[in-house]
Image (spheres, rainbow, N blue to C red):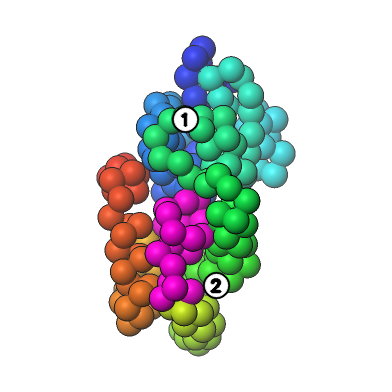
Amino acid sequence: MSSKGVIVVYGMTLSTATQRVLVALAEKGLDYELKVVNLMNGENLTPNYLEKHPFGSIPTLVDSDGFMIYDSRAICRYLEKKYKGHGTELIPKGIKALGLFEQGVSIESSNFDSFARKMVGEKVLKKMRGGEPDMNTVAQLRGQLSEVLDVYEKILSKQSYIGGEVFTLADLFHLPYGAMLVKAGENELFDSRPHVKQWWNKISNRSAWKSVVALN
């Protein structure tokens, strides 16, 4: 369980899902303790950890009152609701603003994440495991992600952020995989589209995200 009065995150800083939670905590200005669960040596599959997360994934968060929750996007939503008055407001108020936010969250999970995650898996994670990427698969995924970002360009020509006019979790959720794509040499996906580039520069240069990047 958590140390008394302390928010505890079970995960690792190299994990994109853990990064999502850590940047949300940073945006909210909340202190936390990170307890490393090393995926490389199977710590996530130990009976002790499986009691916290039955699927054996990371992260899991234990709040200062002992409340436990897993799944990075669910954790981020919980943190915003629980600590609404702290730091950056990450879910807007108002029915129309909330509708646009939910639309943006759905866009990220249904369109961006599936292709970005697979592309990172092919270009980055395969190499980390000693393999080589299938460049035909990479090219196919790049084409699919390009089509998604062409639509993003249209959306972002009419609004400042993917979930409306203010920075929200809908934008924050893009950061880990977006940054890994840039690091893997795929920055042209963002840079070749003026509104996407402007949006990506705004969200990736936020101090909260920079603080998470600095952990690795």
Q: Nearer the viewer, mark 2 or mark 1?
A: 1
Coordinates of residue 132 in the picture (x, y in percent): 45, 74
Residue nearer the viewer, 36 or 67:
67
> Dot 1 surroundings within 10 Å: few (below 14), some, or many (20 or more)?
few
Other residues around mark 2 within 10 Å, as few (<14) / some (14–19) / many (≥20): many
The magenta stretch spans residue 84: no
Give residue 176's position: percent from left, percent from top: 43, 56
Residue placed most toward the observer, 202 or 6: 202
* Number of the label disc, if any, that sits on residue 115: 2
Q: Which residue is drawn at 47% across and 19% down?
A: 6
Whether residue 27 appears in this view of the structure is yes
Residue indicated by mark 1: 85
Q: Where is residue 136 in the image (x, y as percent from the top left)?
A: 50, 87
Residue 1 bears which disc, if any? none
Q: Going 70% across and 30% down the picture, which residue do you hit? A: 51
Magenta span has 162?
A: yes
Say what secondary structure mark 2 lies in.
helix
Which residue type carries mark 2?
A: Phe
Residue at left offset 52%, top offset 47%: 92
Picture quadrant where residue 195 is located: bottom left
Region in magenta: 155-178
- The answer to whether 91 is drawn above or below residue 178 in the figure is above
Mark toward the start of the polypeptide (2 vs 1): 1
Look at the image and tell me whether residue 129 can be seen: no
Taking the view exactly as shown, the residue that stands out farthest to the top is 4
| Callout 1: SS | loop
- 28 lies left or right of 11: left
Report the Cα–Cα distance between label 2 and label 1: 35 Å
Which residue type carries mark 1?
Gly
When the figure is inspected, residue 13 is found, relative to residue 96, above or below; the finding is above
Residue 4, compared with residue 101, is above or below; it is: above
Residue 198 position in % (x across, y down): 31, 69
